[in-house]
Image (spheres, rainbow, N blue to C red):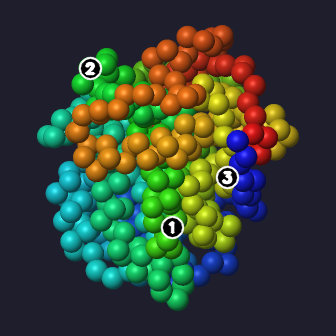
Amino acid sequence: MTSPSLITTPFGATSTADDVLGGVDLTGTRAVVTGASSGLGRETARALASVGAEVTMAVRNIAAGNEVAAEIARSTGRARPRVEHLDLADPSSVAAFVKEWTGPLDLLINNAGLVTGGLERTPEGWELQFATNHLGHFALATRLRPALAAAAASARGGARIVALSSTAHMRANIDFDDIHFDRRAYDPQIAYAQAKTANALFAVEASRLWEADGIVANAVNPGGIATGLQRNFTAQQKQSLEAAEAAGLFTYKTIAQGAATTMVAAVSPEFAHVGARYLDDGREAYTVPNDATLSDNPPRRQGMGARPGGGRTALARQPRNARRLRPRSIRPGAPQTKTTDFRGGCRCETRFATHNATIPVVSVDGGGPQLRSRRAVRPEGSR
Ligand SMILES: NC(=O)c1ccc[n+]([C@@H]2O[C@H](COP(=O)([O-])OP(=O)(O)OC[C@H]3O[C@@H](n4cnc5c(N)ncnc54)[C@H](OP(=O)(O)O)[C@@H]3O)[C@@H](O)[C@H]2O)c1
């Protein structure tokens, strides 16, 4: 397989959102940031507003959103962001948000996400992590497509979508036979991983479908950042995380650093008309085998000095996988009629049995304890 060469930028693991926005003027640019009342979304909204973007914070907690918006206006001296209600797990809320939207939209930052501690379902019966992280954002982007296309057709040219994925995606492909855990045992970490794979695949499919409209979508891994996302972690997960950090397997980023890769996808010229990519540490990430683990470190092994955990699995970039997900995103509860797996695909239940387990590793955002593999990985350009 021939892959395009990886896109790099001047930014890296320690860059902050403000570093990326240095010298950038987003006056006249309209942005929606989901989950902007806390964590990375809050910083993303602040950073975009600080350089003149007209920001709408799409949040489910209006009171918290209003507080953050006021603080953003105070700290940046810029216009106060709009605060609008959006519950991504509720299709009627997504529809209501879009109904209220008028005019073009230059930037859609699909940032909101959650990790659950156990099986939770929406009233439709959809597994909550998949419904929130993927289905809600899929519906939002699809409904906002005309607004994005309108912005792309304007003088500025081009509209961008940024989808927050995670290294946790490496733990699971989409289980097309049982997306919502109706028949398999529930594992919240596998459910989160499946949802984050869906986020990466969304960028692939949206770019394919909407490129002609001037809309590109890219996925990002923000890195490991201490935010509200870890609130549902079990004591065991927290301990594993501490052990992994002590072993030097990952380094926490600050929230400002965590929002930097989102900014690269949102404003950097390198990604202006390029979609379907997956970014990590401010650059396009390597593709790693489907059974690579969180502690694999292809960039560092290639002499690039990046921290562990980077990389997108081959399945999370595969156009066929992305196309297959789309009907299940439009009709989330529809049964899967085609059960053929892809060549190279792996089922999360069996995947780790092939590894030499040595060190348990946990992902900061719920990837969960994972077995360390010493499997060699290839840089993207080599395949
Ligand atoms: N932190 C990490 O280490 C890490 C690593 C990799 C990827 N990520 C990804 O980064 C993104 C941001 O996470 P974060 O770390 O900033 O976590 P966070 O502080 O918990 O922020 C997540 C945001 O999503 C919102 N949200 C949750 N469910 C929602 C729903 N149904 N509708 C609308 N909004 C909803 C939350 O709103 P409430 O405040 O109302 O709950 C919150 O504002 C997520 O997509 C996450 O998967 C994070």
Would you say the beta carbon of the disc 3 residue lies within 8 angstroms of ligand 1? no
In the rendered structure, which disc, 3 or 2, sits on the residue that comes first in sequence? 2
Task: Please report the residue visible at 55 percent of the width from the left and 37 percent of the height from the top.
Answer: 315
Task: Please report the residue visible at 35 percent of the width from the left and 32 percent of the height from the top.
Answer: 338
Residue 6: x and y, percent? 73, 53
Tell which residue pokes out farthest to the right in this image. Answer: 303
Q: Which residue is mark 3?
A: 284
Would you say the beta carbon of the disc 1 residue lies within 8 angstroms of ligand 1? no
The quarter of the displayed image where residue 373 is located: top right
Task: Please report the residue visible at 68 percent of the width from the left and 67 percent of the height from the top.
Answer: 270
Q: Which residue is mark 1?
A: 211
Indicate the secondary structure of the residue bearing disc 1.
Answer: helix
Tags 1 and 2 in contact by the CB under 8 Å rule?
Answer: no
Tell me the mark number nearer the camera, choosing from 3 and 1.
1
Task: Please report the residue visible at 51 percent of the width from the left and 67 percent of the height from the top.
Answer: 211
- Give the residue type at disc 3: Glu
